[in-house]
Image (tube, rainbow, N blue to C red):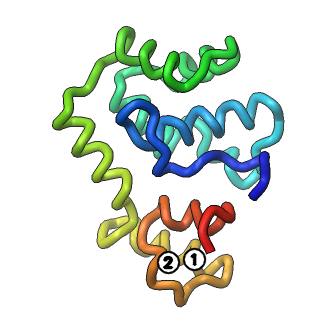
Amino acid sequence: MSDNLPVSGYLKTERLIYFARMCSKARLMKRSALPIDYHEYIGVGFDGRCCRFLNVSYDSVKELIGDGKQDLEILEWCYVNGRRPNDEEVFIWNLFMEKRGWRDDDSELVQREKESIGLGNRAEIQTLFDFYDFDEGRRQ
C-alpha cells in the first residue's frame, strides 16, 4: 500500500465513518501527493456529502487541515460550527455510507470500476468502500 493513498472509508473518526478518508485525501492533495485520478472527487461526491451532513464547507475543512489540525480536532470544529448529529443520525449515516453501491443507483458504477481493474468477477466487492479497499491494496 502506498503512502500516497487515502485511508479506508470504513475508518471512524470518533463515531463517524468516512470523515478520516476525506481529511486524508485533503492532506495528500496539500502535499501534492494525491494521485491524479482522485482530483476530480476532492470536495465533491462523498466529501461534499460528508460536509453537507455536518453543515460545514469543504473549504473550511481544507483550511483546518492546512493549519495542521488533526481529524478529531476538525470533527469537533464541525460539531461546533456546523452541526452535531445525534446517535440516530450517525447510525443512519454510517449504514448509508458503508452500503453505498450495494443494490442502489451506484451498483453499476461499482461493477464498472471492478471491471476496469480486472476484478469484475469478484462478488465480495459490493460497495464503493469495498472497491476502494481492494483498489488501494488494503484487501486482496
- Residue 17, image quadrant: top left
Q: Which mark is residue 114?
A: 1
**Amino acid type, label 1:** Lys
- Image point 53% across, 89% down: which residue? 121
Crowd band around label 2 with a 10 angstrom C-alpha radius: few (<14), some (14–19), many (20+): many
- Image point 78% across, 54% down: which residue? 2
> Picture coordinates of residue 83 (x, y %)?
30, 18
**Residue 16 vertical position relative to residue 71 in the rendered view, above or below:** below
SS at badge 2: helix
**Residue 20 vertical position relative to residue 138 in the rendered view, above or below:** above
For the residues bearing labels 1 and 2, Cβ distance under 8 angstroms: yes
Left or right: residue 93 versus residue 128 is left
Left or right: residue 137 versus residue 33 is left
**Residue 76 vertical position relative to residue 106 in the rendered view, above or below:** above
Camera-side residue of 127 and 2: 2
- Image point 76% across, 29% down: which residue? 30
User: What residue is shown with label 2?
Assistant: 111
Q: Quadrant of the C terminus?
A: bottom right
- Residue 43, image quadrant: top right
**Amino acid type, label 2:** Gln
Q: Disc count in the image? A: 2
